């Protein structure tokens, strides 16, 4: 029997190459009309999920340990940027200053498992939370009250996306280039 730690190790070499395509490894980009149509549908599904879902599980890393928390977000499609805010005295500020590398997964609230996963660098935005208050509140109305109460104490961060994994259902996931 394999130990639990062995099961958690990433697959390398032949084991990774031998994984079925549905496992997400070894996918090759084809440029047939069928593939282009599927990529367009995945892009539409990505845009829909980023529009409808309003929370992400945001992971930062300090001292080799991941730290995950749920935060509200807004996705600016034309900019391909995810925005989130945090209080100035929150530990996320220290963590992101030390290491801006992040990963996130959207949190579905529609009784499905569909979600988007991505990674990137979170940097302080030149915009303020007030610049995007309406966009945040449109996704999640309760955020407006929060911004009204503590907006001056919030730092807005942005993550520019270049690719994302779109998870539609069990076994149905693809990486898309944005």
Image: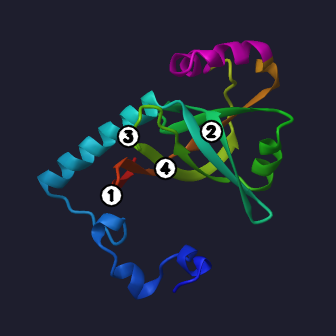
* Colour pattern: rainbow
Q: Which residue is mark 1?
A: 171
Q: Nearer the viewer, mark 1 or mark 4?
A: 1
**Residue 168 locus on image (x, y percent):** 34, 46
Residue 56: which quarter of the image?
Answer: top right
The answer to whether residue 77 is visible is no
- Whether the residues at callouts 3 and 2 have beta carbons within 8 Å, the answer is no
Frontmost residue, 169 versus 72:
169
Name the residue furthest right: 89
Q: Which residue is mark 4?
A: 117
Task: Give the side of residue 136 with respect to residue 166, left or right.
Answer: right
Q: Secondary structure at mark 1?
A: loop
Residue located at (36% from left, 65% from top): 24
Q: Nearer the viewer, mark 3 or mark 2?
A: 3
Q: Which residues are magenta?
A: 132-149
Q: Within 10 Å of the Cα at label 3, are there few (<14), some (14-19), or many (20+) other Cα atoms?
A: many
Disc 3 versus disc 1: distance between alpha carbons? 16 Å
Mark 4 or 2 closer to N-term? 4
The answer to whether residue 72 is visible is yes
- Whether the residues at callouts 2 and 1 have beta carbons within 8 Å, the answer is no
The answer to if 4 sits in the magenta stretch is: no
Residue 46 is tagged as 3
């Amino acid at each position: 029997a394999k130990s639990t730690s062995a099961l958690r190790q990433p697959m390398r070499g032949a084991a990774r190459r031998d994984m079925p395509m549905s496992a997400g490894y070894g996918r090759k980009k084809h440029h047939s009309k069928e593939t282009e149509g599927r990529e367009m549908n995945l892009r539409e599904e990505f845009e829909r999920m980023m529009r409808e879902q309003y929370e992400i599980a945001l992971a930062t890393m300090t001292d080799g340990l991941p730290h995950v928390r749920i935060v509200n977000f807004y996705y600016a499609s034309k900019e391909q940027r995810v925005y989130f805010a945090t209080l100035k005295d929150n530990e996320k500020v220290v963590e992101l200053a030390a290491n801006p590398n992040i990963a996130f997964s959207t949190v579905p609230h529609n009784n499905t498992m569909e979600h988007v996963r991505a990674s990137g660098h979170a940097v302080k935005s030149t915009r303020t939370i007030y610049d995007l208050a309406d966009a945040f509140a449109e996704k999640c109305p309760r955020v407006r009250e929060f911004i009204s109460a503590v907006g001056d104490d919030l730092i807005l961060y942005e993550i520019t996306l270049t690719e994302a994994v779109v998870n539609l259902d069990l076994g149905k996931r693809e990486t898309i280039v944005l």
